[in-house]
Amino acid sequence: MIILFVALPLVVAGILPLVGKVSRRVVPDLLANAALLFLLVYAAITGRHLIAGGPVLQQLSWFGEPVAIRLALDGFSLFMLLAIAVVGLAACLFSIDYMEHYGAKANYYALFLVMVAGMNGLVLATDLFSVYLFMEVAAVASYALVAFGLGQDELEAAFKYLMLSVVATAFILVSVAVIFGMTGSLDFAGVAKALQEINAGAAVGVASAFFLVGFGLKAALIPFHAWLPDAHPSAPAPISAVLSGLLIKVSGIYAMTRIFLNVFGLTPALSTVLMSLGTLSMVVAAFLALGQKDMKRMLAYSSISQVGYIVLGIGIGTPLGIAGGLFHLFNHALAKGLLFLTSGSVQQSTGTRNLDEMGGLAKRMPITAATNLVGALSIVGIPPLNGFWSKLIIIIALIQAGHPVFALIAVLTSVLTLWYFLLMQRKAFFGKLNEKWAAVKEAPFWMTAATVLLALLCVGIGILFSSTVTTWIQPAADVLADGVHAVIGSWGF
Amino acid sequence: MIVQTALLIGLVLFSVLAILLRDLLKSAISLAAASLLLGIIFFRMNAPYAGVFEISVVAGLITVLFILTIALTKAGDEVRESRAANWVFPLFFIAFIIIDALVMKGLLRKIPALASGAETGTFGDVLWKGRTFDLVGQIAVILAGVFAVLALFRKRDKHD
Amino acid sequence: MTNTWYFYLFFAAALVFAGILGLLLRRNLIKLFIAIEVIAKGISLLLLGTGFVKDNILVAQTLVVTFIVVEVSLVATALALIINIYRQTKSLDVRKLARLKG
């Protein structure tokens, strides 16, 4: 019952406000986390069984009549569902303690679950318009979640985010309309097949360009990134973790990758454009991250930079490159989620996000410092953490595909990444303990538990990287490397 | 075709007016007029359901929401718009219209399209049986909107 | 594509462009949102026009209806944000919101 991925969070979200009237904290906490735990278990365990025999296409029927809810679960979608469930669960656990002083917890969890439902729906959709629709579901929920604290900065960030998102929607829908006009269908299989029959190079090129602008805005690729450095820091920490770790990847990268690789087919021109945009994001954002004083803003720019790596890897188009890109997507979701959560711990204990005001926090908050270090090293790409392997695969793929210059740039950017993360570590955690923080305590239980969970995953996946790659990443990469055939052959309903 | 063209020109005119007018209330009413025209255009394209939705929801509900917001933010009239916008907008817009027309003329017959099969069923069939997942999405987005408004208007006793 | 499609595309493009231009040039938050509404009109016109030309008017109508529902949710959320911003800053000027550097 794949529909559970969408239906369960929605149903729980629906009853949460009612439950919240009765019990303000315990039951909402329990319900929300249980829902996400269920999703995680379902994706991790049953999911693999389901797709063992090839993609699962479900057409539901209600009361005997087939109803057009057509969901497709293949390697790529299952991979994304797993990522959503893991980071979502960690952020939700973190919220148990962190959201205490925001109030209205039941409402918060309801929005959170709707956002998760939207992301899951996007990943499972088989239709261009449904992709747009569930993208909007997650987006509307995220606007409210960014502004949840109701402070001036948060409201401003949410409004700017909203405005740019609307422009993204416009571009995406124009492209969908043109594709609909040309092919007469909206579902992936139909469009892919039709595009093979028509010879529509230029029009598909324009449609691709519009999709690139739209989904690029959602993924915060440079030059479409302006909203992210304001939105991600202003949101409450667990929401920043989900936005940076999941939403930009699901709404932006997943949608773009699915459409470009499985529906349009990756042409050399498209590959070059993707690689160039990826490299641009990778480098520019790394430079911009260097000058940041606000901890979360530095992390936000780092997200833009790492998304550049992912797009670069996927843009190469070779199976190894795609695998590297996807692996980095997963690793970054874990590591950046972890980093934002620890920044939330720091913010709650010290009341500030300004790196210059911190210092020596490792002495008072050892667990937070340790997990933050794990996350940082993972993103930089230090062995044996997970980030090392994914970056290595991307660099090897670049060299194999004959792009040594790109590989060199990727390596140099890693050095930059190391620099700014070391800066953050030194300023916040190591060094002399700033007088102000002498009485600071370690973060409450659920917050540390969530960060430890993610840190352990980073280390574990780093050590067990080859089995992770073969079990989860390879099936996903295979689906994408198959290109248009993956969709035409097996998805024809 | 003539009527349709006239309606479309009216639509664009009222929309541009809605953006350019200084008084917020007049803007909202201009937008409502544009929605009304769009609804009529939909009717003439044999799309009665879309027309009804456009008129009742966009011209009706959304206009009411706008007027509500305008009423709740009374001092908003004092925002001084940039003077430059008064001539920049028409200039760029007319330039675009010209480019638009030329591009359209150039594109005529250039974009290939597959002939599509005839449509079967009624609107209800297509919506409920043909695009059911979209209905799930609609429920989700309505939930998102409701929760968003509840969250944004909650009583603040203490916040971050 | 038949000529009628380009006819509708012309007007839809004009609307979307007007809306984007409005987003760039206007300063009042509510005006910015009116610009967003104009973009939405352009999109619904394009979707329905495409369906009309392809003889797929029913599918196009479902798309437009769903799009309008999404639009309502969006408007509600955005106006809630605007009202909150007004309560905090007593102004609707987007320039006053320039505290974050983007």
Image: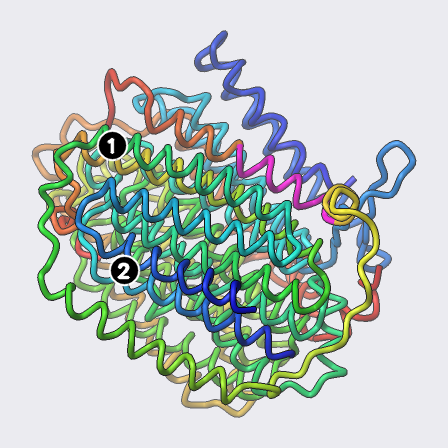
Tell us which disc is closer to us: 1 or 2.
2
The kind of secondary structure element at disc 1 is helix
Q: Position of residue B151 (x, y in %)?
A: 38, 27
Say whether disc 1 or disc 2 marks the residue closer to the N-terminus. Answer: 2
The residue that appears at 55% across and 73% down in the rendered structure is A314
Magenta-span inclusion, residue C34? no
Q: Residue furthest front?
A: B2
Amino acid type, mark 2: Gly
Residue with the mark numbered 1: C84
Q: Nearer the viewer, residue A164 or A302?
A: A164
Q: Residue furthest right?
A: A64
The residue that appears at 26% across and 31% down in the rendered structure is A150
> Magenta stretch?
B131-142
Q: Is residue A236 left or right of residue A11?
A: left
Q: Position of residue A420 (x, y in %)?
A: 25, 62
Amino acid type, mark 1: Asn
Same-chain check, marks 1 and 2:
yes
Report the quarter where the N terminus of chain A lies: top right
What mark, if any, has residue C22 been given in the picture? 2
Q: Position of residue A161 (x, y in %)?
A: 33, 51
Magenta region, main secondary structure: helix
Q: Is there a contact, CB below 8 Å, between mark 1 and mark 2?
A: no
